[in-house]
Amino acid sequence: MSLFNVSSGYTSTWKNSEKLVIKFLFIYFIILSVPLDWKYYISLFSIDWTGLNFYDLFTLSKYVPVFFGLDGYASLIIPVFLAAIGAIIWQRSKEPDYDSLYYWLRVIVRYRLAIGIIAYGFIKLFPLQMPYPSLSNLHTNYGDFYAWKIYFHTVGIAQWYESFLGFVEILAGVLLLFRRTVTFGSGIIIGFTGNVFAANLAYDAGEQVYSLYLVILAAFLFAYDAPRLYSLLIRERYTIANKFQPTFNSKNIKNIRIALKAFIAVFLLVLGATTYANYTKEPYKLPKTTGLSGSYGYYNVREFKLNNQLIPYSRTDSNRWQNVVFEKWATISIKIAKPITLDRSTAEGYYSNDIDRNYESAGVGGRRYFSYDADTVKKKLYLVNKNKNHSEEKFELNYQFLNDSTIVLSGVNEKKDSVHAVLDKVNRKYMLYEGRRKPVRL
């Protein structure tokens, strides 16, 4: 017995070619939408629900199948071949109810897409995905940034705009949860996420495959009403809306639908609440430890000694510090003319330890970023390079505030070479901080 009947008074007919296509699409999108990878369930059952972090749920929402250890575009291409083989085999079995098949496939895809797009909407609504540029970033040459880092900074400087982008994604996802507004939601996603896919390609931002994945799901949903929209808007013909209404024969099916919607609603509410909590307490891409009190700012290195040998200011000396930035959090960046093996990652992921939160140092050269622990009793700083390619670089330094604008650092590096630096704070104004809608004297 079919799960539902068509109540509009007509019986739909399916051509043989359409039957083959719907079988292919059913298998293809089930593979894309329903987690079939056992590693997904290992992640699910390893979550600490008593200390739930938003990134655990966010990771669950980002499911994309992986076959034979091949990720990337293979995740979208391999299912094509599997679906083609499955559809041919399916042709030899008993004919299904194609209306039911198409209906339930759309239900699965729109819920899957809604979860994925709303999850990304939350980390933009509460601007976590693209943080505001740090002070060190403002003192980095434009040419020292990877393209993706420039893109993230460009969006990150406009936090309200980033929040608006998140609102649009959440709105599109909510529209997918209601059958009558699916076309509007999927249309928004095609335009919005399609642009994200293009930007990811242009800036090599690392989410090309997933953004394309979301666009493919949205295109499938949008195709349902595309012929009618073409007839109405392009050909300007009288067009009747599709009034297909599913009538369920089983009370159990109705209960399953209610339970599914309730589960999705609870999942999204918890995800939204935990994302907001992360934003207000400890944004996951930036260190959570507060920096040394009174140190925040940009400093010129007035005097620098290595092994008690005074080294005059130089832009080419590979040992001489040129300038130093103390961030509001426990990061120090130092400008040194020493070759850097860049961190090529896009710094996505949640890490508990500050040393592993590498968003600041990923995709950027020109400066060396150090995570530090401060012993305020002994007046010591313990620095470790955040770049995994230079993790051996360490400093153990004594610090002294001579006044409110001068800091003296002295100690040793990982090679036991003695280091001595006198830092003078530069009080300058930054247009990003001052704003552009009021007079500013620099």
Image (cartoon, rainbow, N blue to C red):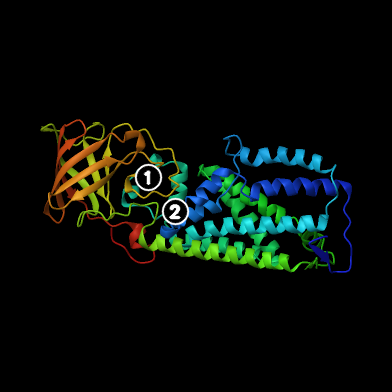
**Number of the front mark, 1 or 2:** 1
Please state if 183 lies on the left or on the right of 405 as rendered: right
The percent coordinates of residue 158 (x first, y second) are 44, 59
Q: Residues within 10 Å of mark 2 (few under 14, many from 20)?
A: many
Badge 1 vs badge 2, beta-carbon distance below 8 Å:
no
Query: Which callout, 1 or 2, points at the residue further toward the start of the chain?
Result: 2
Q: Is residue 397 visible?
A: yes
In the picture, the disc for residue 426 is none
In the picture, the disc for residue 358 is 1
Residue drawn at (70%, 62%) of the image: 183
Relative to 133, residue 370 above or below: above
* Closer-to-camera residue (170/79): 79
* Label 2 sits on residue: 130
The percent coordinates of residue 335 (x first, y second) are 27, 40
Q: Which residue type does callout 2 highlight?
A: Met
- Is the N terminus in the top left, top right, bottom left or bottom right quadrant? bottom right
Q: Is residue 222 visible?
A: no
The percent coordinates of residue 273 (x first, y second) are 46, 65
The percent coordinates of residue 129 (x first, y second) are 46, 54
- Is the C terminus in the top left, top right, bottom left or bottom right quadrant? bottom left
Circle 1 SS class: loop
Relative to 392, residue 275 above or below: below
Circle 2 SS class: loop
Q: Residues within 10 Å of mark 1 (few under 14, many from 20)?
A: many
- Where residue 427 sits, quadrant-wise, is bottom left
* Closer-to-camera residue (203/254): 254
Residue drawn at (77%, 61%) of the image: 229
* Closer-to-camera residue (304/12): 12
